Image (cartoon, coloured by chain):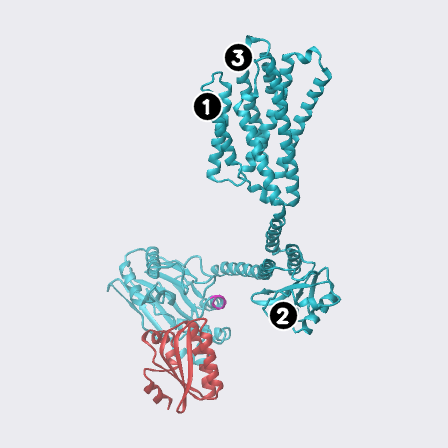
Chain colours: A red, B cyan
């Protein structure tokens, strides 16, 4: 089960992901990101400090937006990944394509 | 029956020829009775049908035959008049004994029938009581056969005890409840006739024996026979009881019939979900059952149908009449009964009293709900006011519910069939997919290898394979498709195609992955990717070249160093970056192997397998497991790792596909 909340903070949208993202709940994550993009925002922070587990299907959701972000000139920074989840991102190599930071401050700085 | 004649003939001689002895007749008579008993026990007790009226009919017929034969004797006697033969004691005794034989047959057969009736609903206590009664009667029979009289009074006491036991047993009348009105009448008639026979026989025999007794002492007087007297008393008592109980049960038998009708209705409704039947049939059965159980004069079912308007199933009423009643109800603002969507059910006894031009004076209606939604309404009518009671409304409510369940079940049936078909399809998919994995790994003198793969669902997304490029080069691949189940399985088969088309070109691992990414970028759906590790074993150089596309780091055990490590090299999953930039994220690693080194290829299903506490199996446990079994042959290492993994998770059910390949150089 996953719960994604979006709030506006300053010049960016903050998406908070709480819970597990597996094959079935990845659809909710996908919908939330889709909605965020449709809202027209260009800057996003994704708070994953309460993301306990992410399956390959969940990673696929993040991956699927890389190209779209580039085209639409959208910046998205993920922060607060726990060690296990960060390792999953790294093994797949997604950390090289997505903006991933340790803390919210670093993420905000990277967002500009 | 041969014994009958024999015994009679034998006993007959007792009157005249004393050469046979005094003891013979009573013994023979007892034997005769015993034989009759065995005969009827076999004939009546074994009979399959437990139709009570049939049983009573048997009693009646036996009695009838016995009476006719006995009347024939009487006729002969009358014809002889006062001739010498009529005065002859032996002849009288012959007639008397023949009569006795007939009566005995009647008594015994009736006794067996009574037994079946009494024991219709057995309990341990009842069976024991009956057994005691039967043995007591047997003792009475034996006592008759014995020539010695023990104590004069004892026989009388014994007789009273027997009659009392018979009396106690006679209260078992449960069978009466199972008869309908008509059967009860029949039973009463048959029992009354049986009682008549009994009286007639008793009278004939007693008078005959007293007549003979006037002339001689040397004959079998049934008036002294405990067995016969006890039997006659018992049969008479039970017949009398049955008659009275039947008589008193007559007025209530319609209630029992109604209950039975309810049971049958339920049965019909639940049976109506067989494949050849349909919803229409359920409604037909419902209306029929409802009318029968509450004796309604008319009824209808209105099935709500959004497309074609309401559909009616009627019983002795036409649609016009229904609409008239409905309009009447609307006109008098009697709401919440016939409008669909309302779950109020009211007994409408009073409301119809004001309806003119219609014979019906009372009505009740109930909703038929399928999956909680009202789909139809059943309405029952009677031509008397206050025609339905609380009991009726309860029954119809229950039957309507049952009908709703039947319809629901009926609708579930095609779904169940469809599911069954899907399961079959998945089984086929599973077979096809397992054939996509290699039967065996390409072997070489330089290494041995063993593989294990298990999908979490019917089909999985893990893939591994080997290919001999030339005499000293073997390619090996392990892949894991994102997601799981059917979609992963399709992508896995694409990976196999990519592997076989590219690997034969003897590419470097990096070029292989780049080309694979290029190909797969056009095949995979938007959110899917495949992690892969691709190895080329060069047995001439004793070297392995490999690249990693986002796959789990390879575990390598070096025998010389005695420790194992995970290769930390960069990479990116296939299909993640679908352009030329991909190759910038891939690197080639090379290592030299020596004998005894172990390479472990696996998918993340292994390292992410969780135990009950939610802890992952992880990299450390896998490494430790390899260290521990590093000296064993590959097959054994594989087995040990798998069994350790299952022991860790504590379940046979797995969350993600497991694949592991052990290569030992």
Instruction: Estimate how packed mark 2 is, as few (under 14), some (14 to 19) or many (20 or more) residues with alpha carbons within 10 Å.
Output: some
Q: Which mark is residue B340?
A: 2
> Depth check: B531 or B458 in front?
B458
Label 3, label 1: how many angstroms apart (C-alpha)? 22 Å
Type of secondary structure dominating the magenta stretch: helix
- Which type of secondary structure does the marked residue at label 2 adopt? loop
**Callout 2–callout 3 Cβ contact below 8 Å:** no
Residue B568 visible here = yes
> Depth check: B223 or B499 in front?
B223
Who's the residue at 63% across and 72% down the image?
Answer: B335
Q: Earlier in the sequence, mark 1 or mark 2?
A: 1
Label 2, label 3: how many angstroms apart (C-alpha)? 90 Å
Instruction: Estimate how packed mark 3 is, as few (under 14), some (14 to 19) or many (20 or more) residues with alpha carbons within 10 Å.
Output: some
Dividing the picture into quarters, in which one does residue B631 lie? Answer: bottom left
Label 1, label 2: how many angstroms apart (C-alpha)? 80 Å
- Which type of secondary structure does the marked residue at label 1 adopt? helix
Residue B50 visible here = no
The picture places residue B92, in percent across and down from the top left corner, at 64, 15
- Residue receiving disc 1: B154
- Residue receiving disc 3: B22
């Amino acid at each position: 089960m996953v719960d994604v909340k979006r709030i506006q903070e300053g010049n960016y949208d903050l998406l908070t992901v709480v819970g597990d993202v597996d094959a079935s709940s990845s659809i909710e994550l996908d919908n939330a990101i889709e909605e965020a993009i449709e809202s027209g925002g260009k800057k996003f922070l994704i708070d994953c400090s309460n993301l306990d587990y992410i399956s390959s299907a969940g990673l696929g959701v993040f991956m699927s937006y890389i190209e779209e972000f580039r085209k639409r000139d959208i910046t998205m920074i993920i922060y607060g990944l726990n060690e296990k989840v960060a390792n999953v991102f790294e093994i797949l190599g997604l950390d090289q394509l997505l903006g991933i930071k340790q803390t919210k401050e670093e993420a905000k700085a990277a967002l500009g | 029956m041969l014994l009958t004649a024999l015994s009679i003939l034998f006993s007959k001689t007792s009157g005249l020829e004393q050469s046979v002895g005094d003891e013979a007749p009573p013994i023979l008579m007892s034997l005769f009775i015993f034989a009759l008993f065995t005969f009827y026990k076999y004939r009546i007790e074994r009979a399959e049908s437990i139709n009570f009226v049939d049983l009573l009919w048997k009693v009646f017929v036996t009695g009838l035959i016995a009476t006719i034969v006995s009347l024939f004797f009487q006729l002969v006697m009358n014809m002889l008049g006062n001739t010498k033969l009529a005065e002859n004691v032996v002849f009288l005794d012959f007639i008397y004994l023949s009569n006795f034989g007939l009566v005995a047959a009647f008594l015994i057969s009736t006794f067996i029938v009574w037994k079946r009736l009494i024991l219709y609903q057995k309990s341990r206590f009842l069976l024991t009581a009956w057994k005691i009664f039967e043995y007591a009667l047997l003792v009475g029979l034996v006592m008759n056969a014995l020539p010695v009289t023990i104590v004069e009074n004892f026989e009388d006491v014994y007789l009273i005890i027997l009659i009392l036991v018979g009396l106690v047993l006679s209260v078992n009348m449960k069978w009466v409840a199972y008869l309908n009105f008509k059967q009860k009448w029949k039973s009463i008639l048959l029992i009354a006739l049986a009682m008549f026979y009994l009286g007639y026989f008793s009278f004939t025999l007693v008078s005959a024996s007293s007549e003979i007794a006037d002339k001689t002492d040397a004959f079998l007087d049934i008036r002294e026979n405990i067995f016969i007297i006890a039997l006659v008393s018992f049969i008479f008592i039970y017949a009398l009881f049955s008659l009275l109980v039947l008589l008193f049960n007559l007025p209530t038998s319609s209630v029992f019939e109604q209950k039975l009708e309810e049971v049958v209705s339920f049965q019909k409704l639940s049976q109506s979900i067989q494949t050849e039947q349909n919803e229409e049939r359920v409604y037909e059965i419902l209306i029929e059952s409802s009318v029968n159980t509450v004796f309604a004069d008319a009824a209808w079912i209105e099935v709500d149908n959004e497309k074609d308007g309401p559909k009616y199933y009627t019983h002795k009423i036409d649609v016009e009449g229904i609409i008239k009643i409905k309009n009447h109800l609307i006109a008098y603002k009697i709401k919440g009964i016939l409008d669909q969507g309302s779950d109020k059910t009211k007994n409408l006894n009073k409301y119809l009293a004001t309806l003119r031009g219609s014979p019906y004076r009372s009505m009740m209606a109930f909703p038929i709900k399928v999956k909680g939604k009202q789909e139809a309404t059943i309405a029952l009518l009677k031509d008397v006011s206050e025609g339905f009671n609380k009991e009726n409304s309860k029954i119809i409510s229950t039957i309507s519910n049952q009908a709703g369940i039947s319809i629901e079940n009926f609708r579930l049936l095609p779904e169940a069939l469809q599911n069954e078909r899907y399961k079959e399809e998945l089984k086929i998919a599973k077979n096809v997919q397992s054939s996509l994995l290699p039967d065996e790994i390409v072997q070489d003198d330089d290494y041995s290898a063993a593989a294990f793969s298990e999908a979490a669902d019917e089909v999985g997304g893990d893939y591994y394979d080997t290919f001999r490029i030339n005499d000293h080069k073997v390619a090996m691949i392990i892949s894991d498709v994102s997601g799981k189940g059917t979609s992963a399985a399709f992508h896995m088969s694409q990976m196999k195609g990519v592997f076989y088309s590219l690997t034969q070109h003897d590419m470097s691992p990096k070029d292989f992955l780049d080309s694979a990414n290029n190909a797969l970028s056009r095949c995979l759906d938007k959110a899917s990717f495949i992690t892969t590790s691709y190895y080329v074993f060069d047995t001439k150089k004793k070297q392995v070249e490999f690249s990693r596309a986002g796959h789990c780091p390879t575990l390598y055990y070096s025998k010389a160093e005695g420790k194992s490590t995970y290769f930390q090299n960069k990479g990116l999953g296939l299909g993640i970056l679908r352009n030329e930039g991909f190759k910038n994220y891939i690197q080639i690693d090379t290592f030299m192997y020596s004998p005894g080194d172990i390479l472990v290829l696996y998918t993340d299903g292994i390292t992410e397998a969780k135990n009950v506490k939610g802890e992952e199996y992880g990299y450390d446990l896998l490494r430790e497991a390899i260290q521990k079994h590093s000296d064993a042959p590959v097959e054994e290492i594989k087995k040990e790792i798998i069994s350790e993994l299952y022991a860790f998770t504590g379940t046979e059910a797995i969350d993600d596909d497991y694949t592991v390949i052990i290569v030992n150089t």
